[in-house]
Image: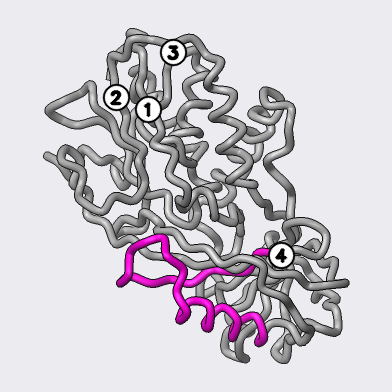
């Protein structure tokens, strides 16, 4: 965009906005961030899982070998600034839902353990399972909240450029009307006495993730109709049915939350600058893989801002606005 160093205003303090802020700090670009402090957002309930094998076809996550090392290095660097842990290496166990799914797995992949995982007796796995030992989790809520607190101590600046990182909106953005297909997601917080399973368990896209001791998060649903942050009875019923399918021990529901994910029609983020207003930028649509994607795309956006790089065509918001 420019070879001069501008002052930046970031509108939105979720995963995208916060990660962009850190990318700007790494390049010594002055910025300030404005957030409307909504009580519930997708960033505040996101699991933050980074999973190498995903989807019904059990395919390798797109550009995993590129994005994952970048994300790990980025979050480790942030931790040195915050003095707190936000990224946690995780082993993820995926349970097969049927015999067909088991046959799809490429067991020779370096992303998959060569041996089948040992599972506790309370886990229902009639079709078996496989383990992804080198995965991870970003504790998104802690990362966002600690980062915003850190940013309050930065010097104020008069912005030259505004970048919108606002997540889901109920109305199209007036300058960046990116086609979206947002999805509501609901999660449960449950108590599972004596479980003490630190690995992530995944069954048919639903994950069980330890929060602390015997407290776990379980989610998440996908709904494209009722786009609000209100938990539903239907969502809870679906979650509990899936949880009972996964485990055979009693549980206690402690909390039930919902939020709306900002998802583009292509399920890829959008970032870049407006073709007619180069002082206005956009970074949104990180979806459920946001923890994995955010660092690489944030740094790509900063490169474009400083004139040291370009936005890739398949995520460049300017391509949709021309």
Q: Which of marks 4 and 1 is in front?
A: 4
Contact? badges 1 and 2 (CB < 8 Å): yes
* Residue position for label 1: 10
* Quarter placement of the N terminus: top left
> Could you tell me residue 253's position as x and y percent?
66, 73
Q: Which residue is drawn at 48% across and 26% down?
A: 21
CB under 8 Å between discs 4 and 1: no
Q: Alpha-carbon distance for marks 2 and 4?
A: 38 Å
Secondary element at tag 3: loop
The quarter in which the C terminus is drawn is: top left
Give the Cα separation between the discs numbered 3 and 1: 11 Å
Residue to which mark 3 is pinned: 30
Q: How far apart are marks 4 and 1 (CA)?
A: 33 Å
**Which comes sooner in the sequence, label 2 or label 4?**
2
Q: Mark 2 points at which residue?
A: 162
Query: Residue at (49%, 37%) from the top-left corner?
Result: 296
Q: Mark 4 points at which residue?
A: 216
Q: Distance between the residues labelled 2 and 3?
A: 12 Å
Q: How many labels does the image show?
A: 4
Relative image position of residue 292 (x, y in whole percent) = 55, 48
Horizontal and vertical percent for residue 271? 32, 38
Residue 297 in view of the camera: no
């Amino acid at each position: 965009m420019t070879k001069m160093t501008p002052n930046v205003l970031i509108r939105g303090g979720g995963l995208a906005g916060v990660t962009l802020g850190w990318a700007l700090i790494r390049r010594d670009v002055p910025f300030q961030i404005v957030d409307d402090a909504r009580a519930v957002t997708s960033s505040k309930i996101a699991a933050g899982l980074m999973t190498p094998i995903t989807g019904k076809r059990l395919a390798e996550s797109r550009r995993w070998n590129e994005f994952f090392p970048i994300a790990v290095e980025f979050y480790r660097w942030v931790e040195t600034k915050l003095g707190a842990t936000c990224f946690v290496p995780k082993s993820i166990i995926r349970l097969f839902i049927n015999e067909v799914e088991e046959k799809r797995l490429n067991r020779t992949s370096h992303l998959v353990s060569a041996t089948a995982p040992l599972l506790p007796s309370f886990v229902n796995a009639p079709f078996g399972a496989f383990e992804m030992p080198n995965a991870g989790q970003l504790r998104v809520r802690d990362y966002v909240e600690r980062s915003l607190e850190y940013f309050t101590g930065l010097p104020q600046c008069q912005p030259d450029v505004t970048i919108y990182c606002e997540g889901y909106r109920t109305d199209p953005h007036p300058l960046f009307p990116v086609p979206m297909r947002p999805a509501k997601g609901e999660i449960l917080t449950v108590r599972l006495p004596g479980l003490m399973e630190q690995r992530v368990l995944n069954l048919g896209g639903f994950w069980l993730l330890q929060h602390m001791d015997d407290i776990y998060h379980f989610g998440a649903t996908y709904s494209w109709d009722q786009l609000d942050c209100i938990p539903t009875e239907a969502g809870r019923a679906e979650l509990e049915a899936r949880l009972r399918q996964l485990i055979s021990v009693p549980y206690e529901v402690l909390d039930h939350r919902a939020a709306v994910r900002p998802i583009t029609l292509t399920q890829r983020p959008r970032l870049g600058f407006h073709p007619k207003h180069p002082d206005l930028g956009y970074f949104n649509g990180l979806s459920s893989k946001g923890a994995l994607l955010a660092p690489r795309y944030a740094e790509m956006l900063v490169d474009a801002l400083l004139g040291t790089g370009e936005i890739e065509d398949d995520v460049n918001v300017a391509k949709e606005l021309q």
